Amino acid sequence: MNGHAKPDEGDDTPAATSADSGPASVPDPEFETPEEVRQEAILLERALGGWRGIIDSGAPTVVFIVAYLVTGSQLRMSLISAIVAGVVIVGWRLIRRQPLQQVAAGFIGLLIAAWFSSRTGKAEDVFLPGMLLNLGYGTAFLVSILVRWPLLGIAMGYFTGEGTSWRQDPALRRVYAASSWIWVGVFGLRLVVQVPLYLAGAVAPLGVAKVILGWPLYLAGAYATYRVLAPVYRAKRSGVTE
């Protein structure tokens, strides 16, 4: 009986060792390491514009709304306050020698919005260029999906150095299309909320809606995009193919 017990124990021991060591030698696509999370988050942040772009674009809007409420709806003073905020942001980036691509684009957009609103004399027109931009982005993402060149795939291909090779991978094509739909929804939701407020001339609610649908919605969209893309990238790293 002892002779039979030893082979049984011997059979169990290698199996347990193999099961324990398997995940260490062959990554499980269902799980990710902290380093994988970090790398994927960095790539996604770059592809979508980064945190600086979010803050730089939102701060002047907050200043405009506060000034508009404090000054009793004085458009000129509110526009000046927003422009000053934009100048401060640009100056801060220059002092810290940080890239100016995003902040410059945001500042130019601010100047255009301020000029347009000053010409029409309507405070709500400050938000019109932003709504048109959302319309343009949403349309671009939608068209890119329809022509089977999803924009998020193009952006991620650039930042990962893969170029357009992702188009040869059915799994990547599907997730890039799915994640691009997320951004169609982001830009579309902004328009659905903001356009009625704009038509009603509700300046303060329009500004609040822009802020809420700016940072928080952006982060929600980025997180949803990450959750869609991450499993496929993990599967690729571990050598799992369909």
Image (cartoon, rainbow, N blue to C red):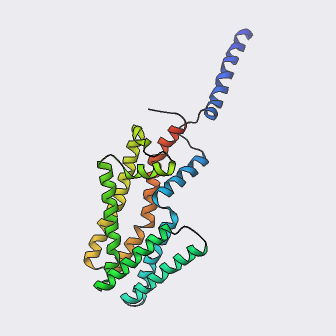
Image height check: is 156 above or below 60? above
Image height check: is 22 above or below 99? above
Viewer-nearest residue: 93 or 82: 93
Residue appearing at x 32%, y 46% in the figure: 148
Q: Quadrant of the N terminus?
A: top right
Whether residue 157 appears in this view of the structure is: yes
Viewer-nearest residue: 35 or 12: 35
User: In which quadrant of the rendered view does residue 65 lie?
Assistant: bottom left
Whether residue 123 appears in this view of the structure is: no
Q: Position of residue 176 (x, y in %)?
A: 40, 47
Viewer-nearest residue: 80 or 162: 162
Q: Position of residue 102 (x, y in %)?
A: 48, 67
Residue with the most extreme left position: 199
Residue appearing at x 45%, y 56% in the figure: 222
Q: In the visual, does 170 lie left or right of 95?
A: left
Residue with the most extreme right position: 2
Q: Position of residue 27 (x, y in %)?
A: 58, 36
Image height check: is 165 above or below 2? below
Q: In the visual, does 9 lie left or right of 178?
A: right
Residue appearing at x 44%, y 59% in the figure: 220
Q: Position of residue 15 (x, y in %)?
A: 64, 23
Q: How many marks?
A: 0
Residue appearing at x 38%, y 76% in the figure: 207
Q: Quadrant of the C terminus?
A: top left
Image height check: is 167 above or below 159? above
